[in-house]
Amino acid sequence: MLKSKALWTCLILMTTLLPGSITLTHAEPMNGYFDQMEDGVIVGWGWEPHLPNTIVPVHVTVTNQETSQVVGDFRPGASLYREDLEANGIGNGRHGFRIRMDWDSLPDGVYQIEGQVDGKSFGNTQSYTKGETALPEQPQEEEAVPAIVPGRSLGTFRTTGYCPCRRCSGNWGKRTSTGAIPRSGHTVAVDPRVIPYGTKLMINGIVYTAEDCGGGVKGKHIDIYYDTHSQAQQHGSRSMEVFLVP
């Protein structure tokens, strides 16, 4: 996201999901995750952590946000091999899936994409905007965050992406508000009234440091730094669980 403006669509690459790498007291392993959209194809993975080498069916729904109508209901087996999954400890890596969605047959609007494995929700949702329609920005209410305790979940935050370009960061792209040089996979912008500068956070298995802020980052909102504007746009706007790293 721009430091002051929301962006849409989706991408985040998982890099640190190895079991035991970080101790979390209020979290279970994710059952699935959506990756980037590829030419109308919904891409992701799903598994059952207690049966790490077993192919499981995933349940993916696509819902029109305005009408609440379910326009897509898919139940593929997650069986495609992905080297990145195996490398990050997701069983034998044969847990990927690809679903072709006929967006051309649908009216303009915003569509929510959700997934489950055995009734348990994926670690993220996706949104797809067709045409010029976009949901208006909703005022961000200040939400109280529980006292920060090492290793615990801080709850669900809205996450977006930003980069050093003038559109995202104005004239401040070379340094963060704390004077650090921003780095992809490391820097996030936060509301320092909610999360103090220097706090280490884990979001989807990646450990970030809170070392920036932005005019549009208020309350339970985290802006994730990317090297390029296209990567920031691809991240879009997503609700994700955030953990404190001791």
Image (cartoon, grey):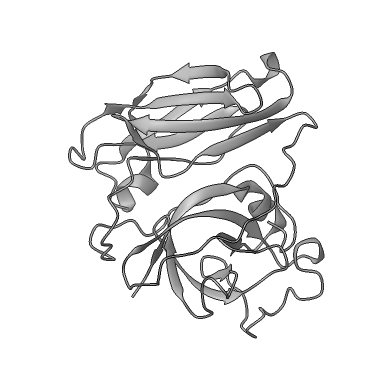
**Left or right for 173, reference 187:** right
Residue 207 drawn at (x, y percent): 43, 67
Position of 141 relative to 39 (above/below): below
Q: Nearer the viewer, residue 13 or 208?
A: 208
Q: Nearer the viewer, residue 80 or 51?
A: 51
Q: Nearer the viewer, residue 232 or 111?
A: 111
**Left or right for 207, reference 173:** left
Q: Quadrant of residue 60?
A: top left
Q: Quadrant of residue 222?
A: bottom right
Residue 110 drawn at (x, y percent): 67, 31
Q: How many marks?
A: 0
Q: Residue at x 74, y 56 (%)?
A: 5
Residue 93 drawn at (x, y percent): 30, 41
**Left or right for 25, reference 121:** left
**Left or right for 233, reference 92:** right
Q: Quadrant of residue 8?
A: top right
Position of 77 relative to 134 (above/below): above
Q: Residue at x 64, y 42 (%)?
A: 9
Q: Residue at x 69, y 47 (%)?
A: 138
- Residue most toward the left? 50
- Residue most toward the top? 105
**Is the C terminus in the top left, top right, bottom left or bottom right quadrant?**
bottom left
Q: Residue at x 33, y 46 (%)?
A: 30
Residue 189 drawn at (x, y percent): 60, 69
Position of 96 relative to 162 (above/below): above
**Is the N terminus in the top left, top right, bottom left or bottom right quadrant?**
bottom right
